[in-house]
């Protein structure tokens, strides 16, 4: 699979756009502790989801694969290049990430997730 320069720039723009959206929603750019870690392994802490990777990173990758596979199935009827499917999968997963960090989603499922306490405590 070869990605065009345009597709790479679109994917980078999606990442930047999602980051800006989360920042505008009140999420810090980096952990309020003032450091940026490659890995944060404590799933029940105020630093959860504030570093580059954590226990939830694999779920985001798996979602991306699922969205890509679903788009592959769709592409059997509606022709799409590999690059377009990748761009769409990244866009869907990034949109989901922004949605799950909205006050609506956080307040809608407060008792079903330990993430809620850490997500709301990082604002």
Image: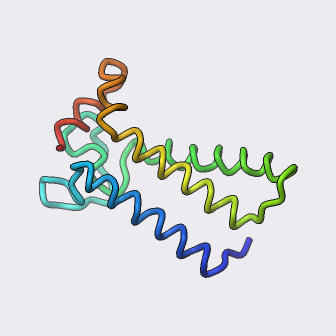
Could you say which quadrant of the image residue 55 lies in?
top left
Q: Nearer the viewer, residue 74 or 56?
A: 74
Q: Position of residue 115 (x, y in %)?
A: 31, 32
Q: Is residue 77 left or right of residue 107?
A: right
Q: How many marks?
A: 0
Residue shown at the point (40%, 66%) measured from the top left: 16
72 shown above or below 84: above
Residue at the limit of the structure toward the left, as seen here? 33
> Looking at this view, is 104 or 3 the one in front?
104
Q: Going by the image, does 63 lie left or right of 81?
A: left
Residue furthest out toward the bottom: 5
Q: How is the image coloured?
A: rainbow
Measuring 48% from the left and 63% from the top, which residue is drawn there?
14
Instruction: Give the image quarter of residue 88.
Output: bottom right
Residue at (40% x, 62% y) in the render: 17
Residue 114 location (% of width, % of height): 30, 27
Q: Position of residue 3 (x, y in %)?
A: 67, 75
Judged from this view, the residue extending furthest toward the right is: 77
Q: Locate the C terminus by quadrant.
A: top left
Note whether 43 is above or below 57 in the view shown: above
Position of 22 with respect to 80 (left or right) is: left
- Viewer-nearest residue: 68 or 88: 88
Establish if 119 lies above or below 91: above
Residue at the image point whose x is 24% and y is 59% from the top: 29
Residue 47 horizontal/vertical position (percent): 21, 45
Q: Quadrant of residue 30?
A: bottom left
Image quadrant containing the N terminus: bottom right
């Amino acid at each position: 699979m070869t990605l065009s320069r345009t597709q790479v720039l679109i994917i980078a723009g999606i990442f930047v756009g999602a980051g800006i959206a989360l920042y505008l929603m009140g999420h810090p750019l980096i952990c309020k502790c003032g450091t940026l870690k490659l890995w944060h392994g404590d799933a029940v802490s105020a630093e959860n989801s504030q570093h580059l990777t954590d226990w939830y990173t694999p779920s985001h990758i798996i979602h991306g694969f699922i969205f890509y596979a679903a788009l592959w199935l769709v592409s059997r009827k509606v022709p799409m290049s590999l690059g377009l499917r990748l761009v769409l999968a990244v866009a869907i997963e990034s949109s989901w990430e922004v949605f799950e960090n909205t006050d609506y989603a956080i307040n809608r499922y407060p008792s079903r997730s330990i993430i809620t306490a850490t997500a709301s405590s990082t604002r």
